[in-house]
Image (tube, coloured by chain):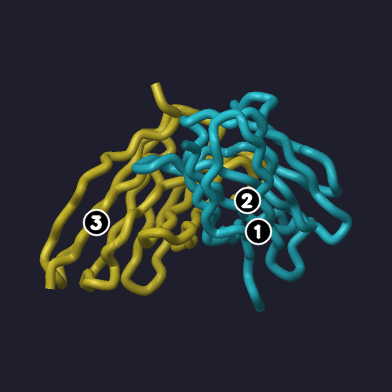
Amino acid sequence: QKEVEQDPGPLSVPEGAIVSLNCTYSNSAFQYFMWYRQYSRKGPELLMYTYSSGNKEDGRFTAQVDKSSKYISLFIRDSQPSDSATYLCAMSAGWSSASKIIFGSGTRLSIRP
Amino acid sequence: DAGVTQSPTHLIKTRGQQVTLRCSPKSGHDTVSWYQQALGQGPQFIFQYYEEEERQRGNFPDRFSGHQFPNYSSELNVNALLLGDSALYLCASSSKDRVGNTEAFFGQGTRLTVV
């Protein structure tokens, strides 16, 4: 069993829709929870990170962490075609969000104009 | 700020050969991590270097080795290449400080193809 499970998609939604992306994990030691966006042939770009449980909002993006259920989510409001990318959930048990990061397999998201 | 730079961008090698990939961290960063991303998969942690020493290592064989130089740049070496080593190799840099919450910035990666 993988430490981090993520539905690979692909997920296709119309422009303006609310997108919900999710991951589950098994390692209780994870403390940092991140979402990365990766465009084709590019390196991952950090969207948001959360320490421990709770919610965090940044513009159109909201990240939620439920440590009791070992479940994390990313919501994208008013989705735009430019949001089309692969979204990777990621977690770390180390001293910071930059310590050994364990990634999900990524969800391919497509926003239809 | 140039961000994290990696070279080369693409590379084709033959099975059994050796390869060296290079990474220059973002200005002000002193820690470099390497990841392997196979097609359709998330990146997998190979190892992390800080103060010129390997500090953490993922589940990769000894064929994968690295080095960090005094200027914080880093190399990833892979010996006896296998077809399964074909992947995007990503370098991420960060900085260790007393606060602890530092973001890892990723480079664009080196696409390695083993034939």
The residue mark sitting in front, 2 or 3, is: 3
Q: Are marks 2 and 3 on the same chain?
A: yes
In the picture shown, does residue A88 fall above or below B83? below
Identified by mark 3, the residue type is Leu
Task: Report the chain shown in cyan.
Answer: B
The span from disc 1 to disc 3 (Cα, nearest Å) is 27 Å
Which labelled disc corresponds to residue A109? 3
CB atoms at circles 2 and 1 under 8 Å apart? yes
Q: Provide the chain ID for the residue under circle 3.
A: A
Q: Are marks 1 and 3 in contact (CB under 8 Å)?
A: no
Residue that carries the numbered disc 2 in the rendered image = A98
- Mark 1 chain: B
Please rate how many residues cluster around mark 3, counting C-alpha atoms within 10 Å: few if below 14, some from 14 to 19, many from 20. Answer: many
- Residue B112, how many percent across, how many down? 52, 46
Q: Nearer the viewer, residue B62 or B102?
A: B62
Q: Residue at x 43, y 40 (%)?
A: B38
State the CA–CA distance, disc 2 to disc 1. Answer: 6 Å
Q: Is residue A9 visible?
A: yes
B35 horizontally vs A37: left or right: right
Q: Is residue B74 above or below residue A60?
A: above
Instruction: State the residue at coordinates (37%, 62%).
Output: A39
Q: Secondary structure at mark 1?
A: loop
**The disc labelled 2 sits on which kind of residue?**
Ala
In the rendered picture, chain A carries what hue?
yellow
Residue A14 occupies quadrant:
bottom left
Residue position marked by numbered label 1 in the rendering? B102
Residue B76 place in picture, x, y as percent: 69, 44
Location of residue B80 by image quarter: top right
